[in-house]
């Protein structure tokens, strides 16, 4: 067994329910959450800050504003079987690959222009 075959055997299958994401997209991530013996779907809505990597370790980070104006960021693996689907609510126009500057901004300053 050569190296290419070995890497292919341990690689996770691609999740077809995740579209091509770009930084600045407003998305809704539908996750399967297991609590005891019950399973439910939890939705995490926010803005994609960045997409990183390729292959098994590819991931994207979504940021949303929770109660009292506190920002919450969450990382998701692109090939995770726990992600049921990702819905892109809107595309926005940004000039950067990583939107770290949104962490310091609140209110109207944190808005991004919509791309049509």
Image (cartoon, helix red, strand yellow):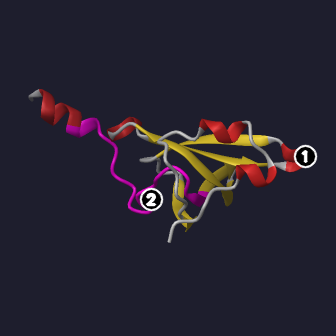
Please state the horizontal and vertical placement of residue 59, each as a whole percent of the image: 47, 41
Q: Quadrant of residue 19?
A: bottom left
Mark 1 neighbour density, 10 Å: few (under 14) some (14–19) many (20 or more): few
Residue matched to label 1:
68
Instruction: Please indicate, yes or no, whether residue 13 appears anywhere in the rendered image.
Output: yes
Q: Residue at x 70, y 38 (%)?
A: 103
Magenta residues (range): 8-30
Extreme residue toward the left, this view = 2
The tag earlier along the polypeptide, 1 or 2, is: 2
Q: Quadrant of residue 57?
A: top left
Q: Nearer the viewer, residue 86 or 41?
A: 86
29 with respect to 105 (left or right)? left
Q: Residue at x 74, y 36 (%)?
A: 104
Label 1 sits on a secondary structure element that is: helix
Residue matched to label 2:
18
Mark 2 neighbour density, 10 Å: few (under 14) some (14–19) many (20 or more): some
Q: Nearer the viewer, residue 7 or 88?
A: 88
- Tell me if residue 8 comes above or below residue 46 in the rendering: above
Please state the horizontal and vertical placement of residue 55, each as a whole percent of the image: 32, 40
How many marks the image carries: the answer is 2
């Amino acid at each position: 067994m050569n190296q290419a075959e070995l890497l292919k055997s341990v690689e996770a299958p691609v999740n077809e329910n995740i579209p091509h994401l770009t930084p600045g997209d407003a998305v809704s991530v539908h996750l399967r959450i297991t609590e005891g013996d019950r399973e439910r779907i939890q939705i995490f809505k926010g803005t994609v800050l960045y997409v990183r990597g390729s292959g098994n370790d590819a991931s994207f980070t979504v940021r949303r504003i929770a109660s009292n104006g506190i920002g919450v960021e969450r990382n998701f693996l692109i090939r995770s079987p726990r992600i049921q689907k990702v819905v892109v609510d809107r595309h926005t126009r940004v000039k950067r690959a990583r939107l770290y500057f949104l962490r310091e901004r609140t209110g109207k300053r944190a808005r991004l222009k919509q791309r049509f």
